[in-house]
Image (tube, grey):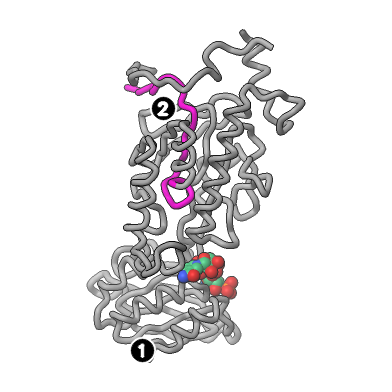
């Protein structure tokens, strides 16, 4: 089988070449990288560490807010190896520095477009910059879900927040509400209750799904009042344009009531950030990337998915890091075995290669 020239050979990179396309300035970063990792959370950085140690010289498009959700987390007490716990941003800095030590390169900006191919060249755009690679690991993580009620968007930054641990300290001495019944809501409640005068924990069912230990910690706080089963229907602004009240509806009777608050924290879970690859890889009904478990392979050869983009169950830093390891090893094996033999490999990776070979 004759291979298209230059497609799978070596990992040498040259200087970036600038060229003009359709009048707009485009920057083509040439030639093709071995591996691009999109997303800089625990999964992406761990994948980068392994890939860098395997001498794949990975390029991480880490996002403008690099570090992922852990940038918004204070104490992390459940990551093995940090006996005294560690602050989320500090831990991400450690992850990043360790990957960098072995030659990982970073683009600290958001990917704006991703064009995936089945076994061909993978393309990631960051604004006017275009990057290409033989393999890509998708690690875009997840983002907070919203309630979708009036006032939620309008009052974002004016008392409505999706991150208690980031913004809680701004609400010293105020009455606030945390909405949701999971571990995120409990974590936010415990943290924000240190600053708030009174905190309403608002949940749509009487039963909380948060772990027992987190519920017990929250219930141990004297200034937390549990309001269930209540559904928020509107965030109402005061004369100063900031949140003043939340209109709540009793989930069983439909009766309404209002609570006066200076802040509201929406902590109702997360949505995977798969929008750039929707329609290209398989995703489930919630938008999570589907992989051939226990591997990280998507249905497209050379495209791997890891971390919270895939995982709706565990979503821990340590499980994300573990999946990053798997992603890097899968990518390494894929690149090592290039060109893939359609008979011996994963069955679906032949399209682009065959097309390229036929064209050459
Ligand atoms: P989650 O477990 O999915 O909980 C989401 C909560 O929001 C649920 O109680 C849900 O109510 C409620 N909710 C969802 N949509 C709603 C809506 N439209 N209106 C009102 N309420 C709504 O999400 P999470 O709390 O973010 O936790 C995600 C994962 O991360 C979990 O596995 C969790 O254990 C883990 N986590 C762990 C820690 C920790 O260990 N320190 C901290 C944070 C998160 P229902 O219960 O009625 O569905």
The response on whether ligand 1 sits within 8 Å of label 1 is no
Q: Residue 179's spot in the image, x, y percent?
A: 45, 75
Dot 2 falls on a residue whose secondary structure is strand
Marks 2 and 1 in Cβ contact (< 8 Å)? no
Marks 2 and 1, Cα distance to the nearest angstrom? Answer: 52 Å
* Mark 2 crowd level (few <14, some 14–19, many ≥20, 10 Å Cα): some
Residue 351 shows in this picture = yes
Magenta residues: mostly which secondary structure?
strand
**Residue at the location (41% across, 47% down)?**
40
* Mark 1 crowd level (few <14, some 14–19, many ≥20, 10 Å Cα): some
**Residue at the location (58% across, 51% down)?**
310
Residue toward you, 44 or 79: 79
Residue 268 shows in this picture = no
Q: Earlier in the sequence, mark 2 or mark 1?
A: 2
Q: Is 25 on the left-hand or right-hand side of 334?
A: left
**Residue at the location (55% across, 47% down)?**
306
Instruction: Examine the structure image and report whether residue 31 is included in the region drawn in magenta.
Output: yes
Instruction: Examine the structure image and report whether residue 87 is included in the region drawn in magenta.
Output: no
Q: Residue 39's spot in the image, x, y percent?
A: 44, 45
The quarter of the displayed image where residue 2 is located: top right
The span shown in magenta is 22-45
Q: Residue 230's spot in the image, x, y percent?
A: 51, 81
Q: Residue 159's spot in the image, x, y percent?
A: 31, 70
Dot 1 falls on a residue whose secondary structure is loop
Check the picture and name the quadrant holding the N terminus: top right
Residue corresponding to mark 1: 223
Residue corresponding to mark 2: 130
Check the picture and name the quadrant holding the C terminus: top right
Q: Is residue 195 above or below residue 271?
A: below
Q: Is 243 on the left-hand or right-hand side of 83?
A: left
């Amino acid at each position: 089988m004759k291979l298209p020239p230059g497609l799978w050979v070596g990992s040498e990179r040259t200087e970036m070449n600038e060229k003009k396309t359709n009048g707009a300035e485009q920057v083509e970063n040439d030639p093709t990288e071995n591996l691009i990792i999109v997303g800089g959370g625990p999964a992406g950085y761990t994948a980068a560490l392994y890939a860098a140690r395997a001498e794949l010289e990975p390029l991480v498009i880490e996002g403008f807010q690099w570090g992922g959700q852990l940038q918004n987390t204070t104490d992390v007490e459940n990551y093995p190896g940090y006996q005294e716990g560690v602050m989320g941003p500090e831990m991400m800095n450690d992850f990043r520095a360790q990957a960098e030590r072995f030659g990982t390169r970073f683009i600290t900006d958001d990917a704006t477009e991703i064009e995936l191919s089945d076994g061909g060249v993978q393309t990631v755009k960051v604004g006017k910059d275009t990057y290409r690679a033989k393999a890509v690991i998708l690690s875009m993580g997840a983002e907070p879900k919203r309630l979708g009620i009036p006032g939620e968007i309008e009052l974002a930054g004016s008392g409505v927040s999706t991150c208690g641990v980031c913004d809680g300290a701004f609400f010293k001495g105020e009455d606030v509400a945390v909405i949701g019944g999971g571990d995120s809501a409990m974590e936010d409640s415990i943290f924000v209750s240190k600053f708030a005068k009174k905190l309403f924990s608002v949940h749509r069912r009487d039963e909380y799904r948060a772990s027992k230990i987190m519920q017990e910690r929250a219930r141990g706080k004297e200034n937390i009042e549990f309001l269930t089963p209540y559904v928020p229907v509107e965030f109402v602004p005061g004369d100063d344009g900031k949140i003043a009240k939340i209109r709540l509806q009793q989930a069983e009777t439909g009766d309404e009531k209002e609570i006066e608050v200076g802040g509201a924290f929406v902590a109702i879970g997360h949505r995977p950030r798969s929008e750039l690859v929707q329609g290209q890889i398989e995703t489930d009904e919630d938008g999570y990337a589907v992989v051939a478990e226990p591997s990280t392979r998507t249905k497209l050869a050379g495209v791997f998915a890891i971390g919270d983009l895939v995982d709706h169950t565990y979503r821990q830093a340590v499980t994300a890091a573990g999946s990053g390891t798997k992603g890097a090893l899968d990518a390494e094996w894929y690149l090592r075995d290039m060109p893939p033999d359609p008979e011996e490999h994963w069955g679906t990776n032949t399209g682009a290669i065959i097309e390229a070979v036929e064209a050459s």
